[in-house]
Amino acid sequence: MDERRRRQRTDLDAQLKIKKTDGSKIAEFDIIVTDVSITGIGFTCADELEIGSIYEGTLTIWTKEKIKVFLDIVRRDQKEDTVKYGAHFVGMPDLYKRKIGVYQTVENESKKQNQEDKE
């Protein structure tokens, strides 16, 4: 998959449940979050999701807060029996963008400190 991310992505232990928002049959999908940024999210899913479709979801972040999100699926990459997706957040409130940014800063500083400790 070509790298097209505009923002830094950070590994994040988070949970995400999504459903399609077009009024069709409501189905929830099992998602495994792989990374997140202030503008989007990467995840794997065994089910087929449509590129260009908007999905509504609830993202549970490291603080155990539940954030209502809307995702625009922009990338799909088949890997054996699962598919890795990339999605942009649609209408993400600034408060949650800042929380993700703070988490990334803390993670980066922690990694830098661990590397310096090893040297």
Image (cartoon, rainbow, N blue to C red):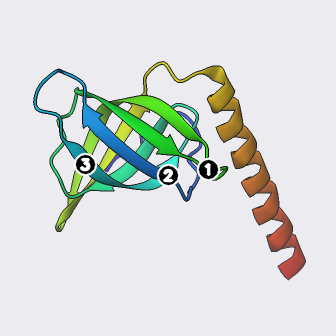
- Give the mark, 3 or 2, whose residue is nearer the N terminus: 3
Q: Position of residue 5 (x, y in %)?
A: 47, 38
* Label 3 element class: strand
- Judging by the rendered image, the residue that carries numbered circle 1 is 64
Q: Tell whether 101 sits left or right of 20.
A: right
- Judging by the rendered image, the residue that carries numbered circle 2 is 35
Q: Tell whether 36 sits left or right of 97.
A: left
- Can residue 17 be seen here? The reply is yes
Residue occupying the point 17% across, 68% down: 80
Q: Position of residue 8 (x, y in %)?
A: 59, 43
- Image quadrant in which the C terminus is located: bottom right
- Can residue 5 be seen here? The reply is no
Indicate the amino acid at tag 2. Asp
Q: How many marks?
A: 3
Q: Tell whether 119 sits left or right of 84.
A: right
- Judging by the rendered image, the residue that carries numbered circle 3 is 29
Residue count near mark 1 (Cα–Cα under 10 Å), binned few <14, some 14–19, many ≥20: few
Residue occupying the point 32% across, 40% down: 18
- The CA span between labels 2 and 1 is 16 Å
* Label 2 element class: strand
- Give the mark, 2 or 1, whose residue is nearer the N terminus: 2
Please state which of the two labelled residues, at mark 2 or mark 1, is closer to the viewer: 1
* Label 1 element class: loop
